[in-house]
């Protein structure tokens, strides 16, 4: 099935929670409401005509101008060998999205990574801890308004330009 | 006299307590800096929780700072065991966004470099697999053969590990004179060597006993956890990006996609993951012969502006690296810097599955499991 057919199918079931087909220039996607994502995901996985058994990629992208952190679910079906892209826009001031960990176990670490780097809270996640950064790191580095702290445990995070250093010598 | 089976406070005298063990972050068999926290009942693990991030170099954040061309050398460091394919993925993402077409000879150079890199990586994987469970000799042989490829790649681009060979629009340098003949001479020597490695390792009784039926991944679980590449194919799924979502000039080559058959145990055990890589080396050699035979004339790089500014848009790119489908999500906003780059690597997916697989496994088998997944720690952390 192509994106348009899948969108129509989902729209009939979920109504306004599933948006129209949109284009990101190089692929089409469908926007889904953050609170409905788990139910939509279950249908995508379990309906025999869709059978999206694999969450291939889950990426987050901060969009301050839209006030959203956009999460892109790239799905693939090894049964029908077709793909589908679903997007969820989490509000920047209250970034909360239902987890899909119980639909696709692969989401467990991918959601932890997004929580770690972009600060999106995945409601119902079994183990939402930082994955790559230390537990006591402050802030979410991939947000566009992130300002790095000048030091971490006494280790400076700023270094003078090597060009300036050589000038002084 | 009655036998006392309880302590005064009511605890069973035979009850045992779980033991918590720490493995890593410095450990010879973890293939990079990574740590496991193991909860074990004697020799049997209840769980092995992976603690990653020791090699996090914020490569995705760096991409937002250094621009489209400037990011290429950083992609080498994502997976330094097979840097060519990561180079290629980044170049492809930028080319799709900017609408650049790579000249045919450039694509052939890429395939030659990428397949040499694949053999390199699989040699290390197969050799290290033997070493991790106690067979030292095959590793020394594998590294010896890998050295020959390193020499070839050094001649190609001047570097032996972090190549920085590809560019947006093609490759940095054409093949040096006589390179094709050298690769063919190497392949004549290499193909019999793969059979030798096969003889030395695959049928070894101890090797089979240590790997067969260990950490079996069913087809369904492999897909649910999004295992990719050889790890997925070992579980019986015939899916290779080069074949089923083709890119570059791969459709022009004739090669097979080996899958796990469970020859010594069940489909999807550690032995299957090993043998799939061994067969893939033979297939890469086949692709290399065809690529060198059919090498077209012409330029190796398209004209690409120094100040590269692709129009706003988003792209998903999939490349078959030695560790499987590497999935890139790249967002451009029309400026000279990428807006967002996300890389989902093969090792990341495999690493996320270890906790589930570790339940009920012997501690010694964890080493076999990590080696069979061919995990490269910096690829998990980026």
Image (cartoon, rainbow, N blue to C red):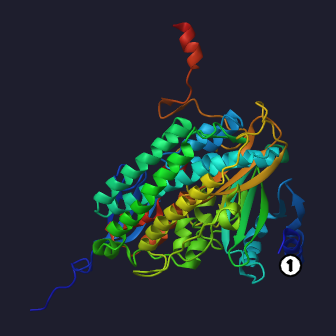
Q: Quadrant of the N terminus of chain B?
A: bottom left
Quarter where residue B320 is shown: bottom right
The chain identifier of the residue carrying mark 1 reads A
Looking at the picture, tell me which residue is in the foreground, B105 or B349: B105
Looking at the picture, tell me which residue is in the foreground, A152 or B378: B378
**Which residue is denoted by mark 1 in the rendering?**
A13
Residue sitting at x 78%, y 31%: B307
- Secondary structure under the numbered disc 1 in the rendered image: helix
Looking at the picture, tell me which residue is in the foreground, B379 or B187: B187
Quarter where residue B70 is shown: top right
| Apparent side of residue B15 relative to residue B188 in the rendered image (left or right) | left
| Apparent side of residue B364 relative to residue B13 in the rendered image (left or right) | right
Query: Where is residue A128 drawn, in percent x and y?
Result: 58, 59
- Whether residue B332 is visible to the viewer of this picture, yes or no, is yes
| Apparent side of residue B67 relative to residue B276 in the rendered image (left or right) | right
Query: Where is residue B229 drawn, in percent x and y?
Result: 57, 65
Looking at the picture, tell me which residue is in the foreground, A147 or B176: B176
Quarter where residue A27 is shown: bottom right
Residue sitting at x 43%, y 81%: B263
- Whether residue A137 is visible to the viewer of this picture, yes or no, is no
Q: Residues within 10 Å of mark 1 (few under 14, many from 20)?
A: few
Numbered marks: total = 1
Instruction: Examine the rendered structure and indicate whether residue B68 appears above or below residue A119.
Output: above
Query: Where is residue B282 drawn, in percent x and y?
Result: 50, 64
Query: Where is residue B347 drawn, in percent x and y?
Result: 53, 58
């Amino acid at each position: 099935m192509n994106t348009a057919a899948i969108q129509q199918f989902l729209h009939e079931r979920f109504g306004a929670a599933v948006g129209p087909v949109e284009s990101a220039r190089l692929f089409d996607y469908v926007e889904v409401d953050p609170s409905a994502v788990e139910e939509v995901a279950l249908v995508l996985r379990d309906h025999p005509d869709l059978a999206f058994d694999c969450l291939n990629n889950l990426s987050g992208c901060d969009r301050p101008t839209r006030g959203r952190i956009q999460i892109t679910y790239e799905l693939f079906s090894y049964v029908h060998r077709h793909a589908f892209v679903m997007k969820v826009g989490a509000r920047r001031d209250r970034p909360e999205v239902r987890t899909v960990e119980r639909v696709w176990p692969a989401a467990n670490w991918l959601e932890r990574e997004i929580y770690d780097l972009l600060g999106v809270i995945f409601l119902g996640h079994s183990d939402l801890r930082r994955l790559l950064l230390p537990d006591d790191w402050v802030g979410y580095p991939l947000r566009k308004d992130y300002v790095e702290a000048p030091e971490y445990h006494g280790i400076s995070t700023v270094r003078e330009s090597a060009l300036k250093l050589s000038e002084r010598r | 006299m009655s036998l006392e089976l309880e302590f005064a406070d009511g605890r069973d005298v035979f009850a045992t307590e779980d033991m918590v063990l720490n493995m890593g972050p410095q450990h010879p068999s973890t293939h990079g800096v990574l740590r496991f926290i193991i909860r074990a009942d004697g020799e049997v693990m209840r769980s092995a929780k992976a603690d990653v991030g020791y090699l996090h170099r914020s490569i995705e954040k760096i991409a937002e700072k250094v621009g489209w061309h400037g990011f290429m050398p950083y992609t080498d460091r994502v997976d330094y065991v097979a840097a060519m394919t990561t180079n290629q993925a980044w170049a492809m993402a930028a080319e799709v966004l900017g609408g650049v077409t790579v000249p045919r000879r450039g694509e052939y150079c890429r395939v030659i470099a990428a397949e040499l890199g694949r053999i390199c990586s699989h040699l290390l994987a197969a050799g290290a697999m033997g070493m991790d469970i106690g067979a030292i000799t095959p590793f020394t042989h594998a590294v010896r053969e890998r050295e020959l490829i390193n020499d070839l790649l050094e001649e190609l681009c001047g570097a032996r590990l972090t190549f920085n060979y590809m560019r947006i629009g093609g490759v940095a340098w054409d093949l040096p004179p006589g390179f094709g003949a050298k690769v063919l001479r190497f392949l004549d020597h290499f193909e019999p060597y793969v059979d030798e490695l096969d003889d030395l390792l695959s049928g070894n009784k101890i090797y089979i006993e240590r790997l067969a039926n260990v950490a079996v991944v069913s087809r369904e679980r492999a897909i649910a956890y999004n295992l990719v590449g050889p790890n997925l194919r070992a579980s019986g799924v015939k899916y290779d990006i080069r074949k089923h979502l083709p890119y570059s000039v791969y459709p022009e080559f004739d090669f097979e996609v080996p899958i796990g058959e469970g020859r010594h145990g069940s489909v999807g055990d550690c032995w299957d993951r090993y043998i799939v890589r061994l067969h893939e080396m033979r297939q890469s050699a086949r692709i290399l012969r065809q690529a060198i035979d059919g090498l077209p004339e012409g330029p190796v790089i398209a004209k690409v502006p120094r100040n590269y500014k692709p129009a706003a848009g988003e792209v998903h790119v999939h490349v078959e690296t030695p560790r499987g489908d590497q999935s890139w999500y790249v967002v451009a906003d029309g400026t000279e810097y990428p807006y967002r780059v996300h890389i989902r690597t093969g090792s990341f997916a495999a690493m996320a599955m270890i906790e589930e697989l570790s339940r009920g496994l012997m501690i010694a088998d964890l080493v076999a499991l990590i080696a069979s997944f061919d995990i490269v720690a910096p690829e998990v952390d980026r």
